[in-house]
Image: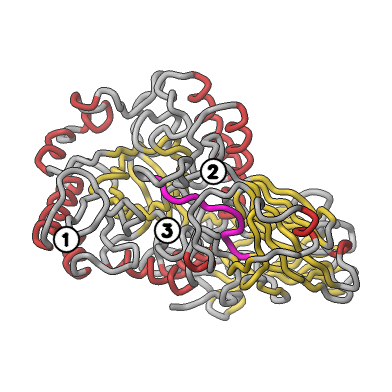
Amino acid sequence: MKHVKCYIPEYPRPQFVRNDWQNLNGEWAFAFGDETDAADALAGRLDRKINVPFTYETELSGIHDTAQHNTVWYSRKISGKEGKRTILNFDGADYVTEVYINGILAGTHKGAYTRFSFDVTDLLLNHTGVLTVKCTDDDLPVQVRGKQRWEAQSFGCWYVQTTGIWKTVWLEYVDDVRLTKLKITPDISDSSVTFDMAVNKPADDVEVKIAVSFDGRPVQTVSVIAGDIDNTVKVRLDSRSITYQAEQWCLWNPALYDVEVTVNKSGREADRVGSYFGLREFTVRNGKILLNGGPFYSKLVLDQGYWKESGMTPPSEQAIIDDIRLAKEMGFNGARKHQKNEDERFYYYADIMGFVVWCELPSNHWFSDEAVKNISVEWLDIVTQNHNHPSLVTWVLFNESWGVRGIASNPRQQNFAEGLYHMTKSIDPMRPVISNDGWYHAKSDILTLHHYEQDSNWLTHFYDTREKLTDGYCGNSQLLPFAAGFKYEGQPIIFTEFGGTHYAHDEGWGYGASVHTDEEFLERFGSLIKAVKNMDISGYCYTQLTDVEQETNGLLTAGRTSKVPIEKIAEIMK
């Protein structure tokens, strides 16, 4: 496995890397809100200990209490550096997060799945301080929740809630003038890449220099003066001035270009950021999905991104690598990350290992004006933060009408789905967007279908013509492919949920009648895969990679043990 030049082990933001940083994961003081008052919490007097970034509900936190606690407090000491600004970064905390330094509010963030930062320099005393974090969460289904339950016990396909800090917390030490944005957009039509950049204090004497290299060889270097708004520069990767043929990113050759961005103030280096990109194009054209202009058949696996011992938080960086490796060994070429904005290191390893990823909005479960505001803000942050990863090929807005239960005929909910579609396209026109995965699509670049029929003969019968795929088969008239006012317009079709077979020696549930032996499991799996492959479609997504709590229909257990030999699954997947 070949890392990019800027890779740092455990670094949480692999597309925007600075070398001067401190990982704050580890033991923090902790308390539930009903065990302490604000005065003690702000002074750092908390009685419990917790292992950040694992939430109190998980084993690896050291607490493992799955009951709902609406308020949690964290505390630890932090240090700054002489002559540097101290930036405090949270990769993810759920849901309303208040951050205090030495008892003074540094900032507040609302949301569960996105990164946020505060400049805490001026709140430190002699470059040190007590960092206190208050996270407030509840069980309201109007929030962006994903697969987090909103009842006292897990049920159906909803699992233990995630409360508080659940991703890495870290410090960066930076100059007064620094890079604040680096959006990278490749274009295979002319082997070029466009950089959209911004600095926090633009001026005529602030220069941004971008150096692109490949496999240690210089490719191009360009410089721009930082203006008052975002600066854009386009770089050709195969111009006649260099003896170099641009390499494209694909599954069998995940070629990546290294990027080094230097910010100079009056000739002095003020900031240096490492990044990378892949030259690739994932498009929808004439009813087909294309990767770099060639047909691409999606063989995806549904991946919830939960671990038995750590919930939504990967237990280690190696655990991320292992999940991608196991999926590839079974014959899948990508994953639909279901109802979760994953740890960004997952996208990084997908980038370097050649594995495509669908990124999905974690759903709320109740439609309201408040939900519209919450979703719009959090989704735009998700799109912006993940934009640069070449492995990420598709955006999914809603799943099975969760959060927009009336989308089949409700104009407000249809308008919201269509509005999010166009809003996403305004930021990222290079990826297809799916408005409502499974059924009742509004504006959508791909038609996606869900069906958990376990009898492959019936599944074939339901979808043995193109019309049954695009118009809905007669036995499922309540779940049509398109919402009222929308119709099939030649989009490629992908079966994005099917399978979910339950192996009877597991506790829990799956779809349809259980199987009881390896032979039964493989026969069922193989017949379902064959039925879907024979459809006139562009790919599929099998449910699912691993068991999660009571939902035991994975190809692997929650502990990542294969239920049947992986090589036999791979043989069926060929």
Residue 459 place in picture, x, y as percent: 16, 39
Instruction: Give 497 or 135, whichever is nearer the viewer.
Output: 135
Q: CA distance from mark 2 to mark 3?
A: 30 Å
Q: Which numbered circle lies on residue 429? A: 2
Q: Quadrant of the N terminus?
A: bottom left
Q: CA distance from mark 1 to mark 2?
A: 36 Å
Q: Residue furthest front?
A: 35
Circles 1 and 2, Cβ within 8 Å, touching? The answer is: no
> Which quadrant would residue 380 be assigned to in this image?
top right
Mark 1 crowd level (few <14, some 14–19, many ≥20, 10 Å Cα): some
Q: Main secondary structure of the magenta part?
A: loop
- For residue 306, which numbered disc appears in the image? 3
Residue at the spot of label 1:
572
The answer to whether any part of residue 458 appears in the image is yes
State the residue in front, 386 or 217.
Answer: 386
Nearer-N-terminus badge (1/2): 2
Q: Which type of secondary structure does the marked residue at label 3 adopt?
A: loop
Q: Amino acid at mark 2?
A: Pro
The span shown in magenta is 158-168
Residue drawn at x 44%, y 46% is 147
Does residue 160 belong to the magenta stretch? Answer: yes
Locate residue 486 relative to residue 96 in the image: left or right. left
The picture places residue 343, in percent across and down from the top left corner, at 53, 61
- Label 1 and label 3: CA atoms lie apart by 26 Å
